[in-house]
């Protein structure tokens, strides 16, 4: 019997215990961003349609380009909609990042939407880009994609933090990513990344994930590499490094400042 598999570079990195670097795509409309991410050295990118206006066709084109560049494409969805999640995964994504999760049941809903039976309720839709649009037997395709498709849950609410142990225990959830900005706002400490409550949130999430072999991600701390390094040392293994917009603005601002600092003779 022929076996089929789908490579997920992010999974491979995490399985080695190494730290994975992620780029967030928020303003790029072209597939070039996938190759840029690969050349820069990112294992993964995620297209953030919670906070931009990209349409589903553009998102899926970027995801397919990322597959071709060996960069794992994830999508942060704006809502926990099974219909939307299924379309994005059929279009080339290898996982979803789920915001606004408040309970283990919310996390389980995402798993059901992202996984084929018997793990979930995702519907089979024919030839897929993950197999180069080759015709693959349904059972083999579902098994391969269930193994390769990741479910990332955001821990960015007080309710989620209160249930972090239960969320980490949900079968099919791969990674819990702390959304530091939104969590700080909920905790009443907006922008106070050095606050003890932030350290406690990361410690609780890391401790909750360890018994279940789940991974922890650092989100919203692109401006604080010192804190990121500390949370990685404590056990986090996925780092959201920043957005394409932030990278462009930082480089453009630096170049403009350099030119304006030159002395005209």
Image: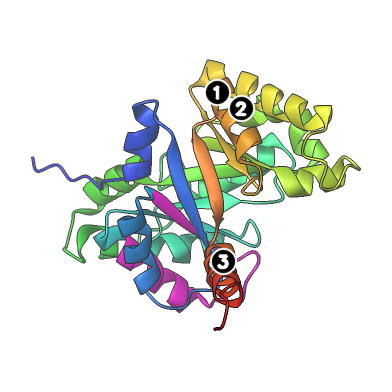
Can you say whether 222 is above or below 103 in the image?
below
Q: Label 1 vs label 2: CA separation?
A: 5 Å
* Residue occupied by mark 3: 254
Can you name the residue that lies furthest to the left here?
1
Q: Considering only vertical position in the picture, is 51 above or below 155?
A: below
Q: Is residue 231 left or right of residue 3?
A: right
Q: Position of residue 16 (x, y in %)?
A: 34, 27
* Residue 95 or residue 106, whichever sits in front: 95
Q: Which mark is nearer the camera, 1 or 3?
A: 3
Look at mark 1 in the image and give the residue it sits on: 233
In depth, the one of 112 and 196 nearer the eye is 196
Q: Residue at x 55, y 23 (%)?
A: 233
Does 16 sit left or right of 259 as displayed? Answer: left
For the N terminus, the image quarter is top left
Q: Is residue 238 above or below residue 247?
A: above
- Neighbourhood count class around disc 2 (C-alpha, 10 Å): few under 14, some 14–19, many 20 upward: few
Q: Which residue is mark 2?
A: 230
The outermost residue toward the right is: 188
- Please report whichever mark, 2 or 3, sits nearer to the chain's N-terminal start: 2
Q: Is residue 221 found left or right of 112 in the rendered image?
A: right
Where residue 106 sits, quadrant-wise, is: top right
The image position of residue 140, as x and y in percent, is 22, 46
Q: Which residues are magenta?
A: 44-66
Q: Is residue 96 visible?
A: yes
Q: Is residue 124 magenta?
A: no
């Amino acid at each position: 019997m022929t076996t089929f598999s789908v490579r997920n570079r992010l999974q491979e990195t995490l399985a080695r215990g190494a730290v994975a670097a992620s780029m967030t795509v928020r303003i790029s409309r072209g597939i070039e961003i996938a190759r840029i991410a690969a050349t820069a050295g990112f294992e993964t990118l995620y297209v953030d349609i919670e906070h931009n206006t990209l349409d589903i066709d553009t998102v899926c084109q970027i995801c397919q380009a990322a597959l071709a560049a060996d960069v794992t494409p994830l999508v942060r969805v704006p809502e926990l909609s099974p219909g939307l999640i299924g379309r994005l995964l059929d279009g080339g994504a290898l996982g979803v990042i789920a915001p606004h999760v408040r309970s283990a049941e919310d996390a389980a809903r995402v798993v059901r939407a992202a996984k084929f039976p018997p793990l979930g309720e995702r519907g089979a839709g024919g030839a897929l880009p993950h197999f180069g649009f080759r015709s693959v037997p349904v059972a083999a395709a579902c098994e391969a994609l269930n193994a390769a498709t990741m479910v990332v849950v955001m821990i960015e609410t007080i309710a989620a933090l209160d249930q972090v142990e239960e969320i980490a225990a949900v079968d099919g959830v791969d990674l819990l990513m702390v959304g530091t900005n939104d969590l700080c706002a909920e905790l009443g400490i907006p922008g106070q990344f050095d606050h003890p409550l932030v350290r406690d949130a990361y410690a609780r999430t890391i401790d909750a994930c360890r018994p279940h072999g789940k991974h922890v991600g650092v989100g919203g701390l692109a401006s604080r590499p010192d804190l990121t390094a500390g949370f990685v040392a404590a056990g986090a293994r996925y780092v959201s490094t920043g957005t394409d917009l932030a990278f462009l603005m930082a480089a453009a601002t630096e170049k403009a400042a350099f030119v304006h600092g030159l002395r005209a003779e």
